[in-house]
Amino acid sequence: MAARLDPAEGVLAGDWYDTVALSATRLAVVVGDVAGHGPASAVFALRLKHSLLTALRAGLAPGDALATVCGELADVPAGQFATAFVAVLDAGRGVVEHANAGHPAGQLVAAGGRWTELDTTGPLLSSVFVGRDWTTTTTAWAPGDLLLVHTDGVTEARDAAGAEFGTEGIHRAVAASGTEDPHRVVDAVAATSMRFGGSQPRRDDHTVVCLQHVPVAPAARTSSDVGRDAVSRR
């Protein structure tokens, strides 16, 4: 895994990301973006991150975790909202389970170069949507595949002519960096997006998270292992 968060210049970030190991073969990842910047948005982001990780540790599927957390937002003003991408990566089963609350689509990059969008599965997180449901979607995840998640600051970077970096910009950056190293992918996407936006101050946070399914080779057997096996068979 590799990740990078570049805050908008001069303000506290409203973006956040985190991971939590659910078992030896299952990892949960959350990436979110709170509307606005400054202390209030940063506190709201921290609250959402903590609540989502708690729900995932309790064994809830991504969609159920979003519904549970949204149910706790009745005290939040209607104008305060966030988007969130939640996924559980299961190396044992070879799948990614995801739910998306109004967030930019996650990008699943197959080892052969095929791109699959993990798109929205329900509304954004807001007190307006308390009681709503989010669907959990399951997608195959093979060794060598990458999961790339970003916030809208990356794709909405604009050049001097007003054109957006967009998903196409991400595709170009990954094609140039290759998919062998998640750290290289993250740095390539972030740097290419910021160069595309030029020298003007960044008004949005930029967050990029990349996770790769890496097969683990069986541990080499030692002479002591063989000896213990022989004793156990006696």
Image: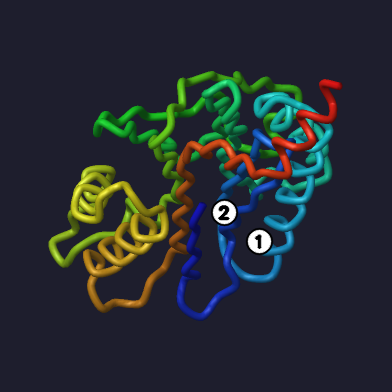
Is residue 200 rendered to the left or right of residue 3?
Answer: left
> Is 168 displayed left or right of 140 in the figure?
left
Q: Quadrant of residue 86?
A: top right
Q: What residue is disc 1 on?
A: 41
Question: Could you say which is closer to the camera, residue 191 or residue 72?
Answer: 191
SS for dot 1: helix
* Whole-percent x, y for residue 37 in the image: 58, 66
Circle number at residue 181:
none
| N-term mark: 1 or 2 | 2
**How far from the left and from the top, in percent, is residue 15?**
56, 58
The relative height of residue 234 versus residue 55 in the rendered view (above or below) is above
Q: Which residue does the image show at 50% across and 58% down from the upper left?
A: 3
Tell me which amino acid carries mark 1: Ser
Mark 1–mark 2 CB contact (< 8 Å): yes
Q: Quadrant of the C terminus?
A: top right
Residue 54, located in which quarter of the rendered image?
top right
**What residue lies at 84% left-to-right and 26% top-to-bottom?**
232
Compared with residue 189, is residue 114 higher up or lower down, i.e. above or below?
above
The kind of residue tagged 2 is Ala
Q: Secondary structure at mark 2?
A: loop
Q: Is residue 35 left or right of residue 80?
A: left
User: Label 1 vs label 2: CA separation?
Assistant: 7 Å
Callout 2: few (<14), some (14-19), or many (20+) C-alpha neighbours within 10 Å? some
Residue at 50 percent of width and 39 percent of height: 103
Looking at the image, the residue that sits furthest to the left is 161
Whole-percent x, y for residue 145 in the image: 39, 35
Residue identifier under label 2: 35
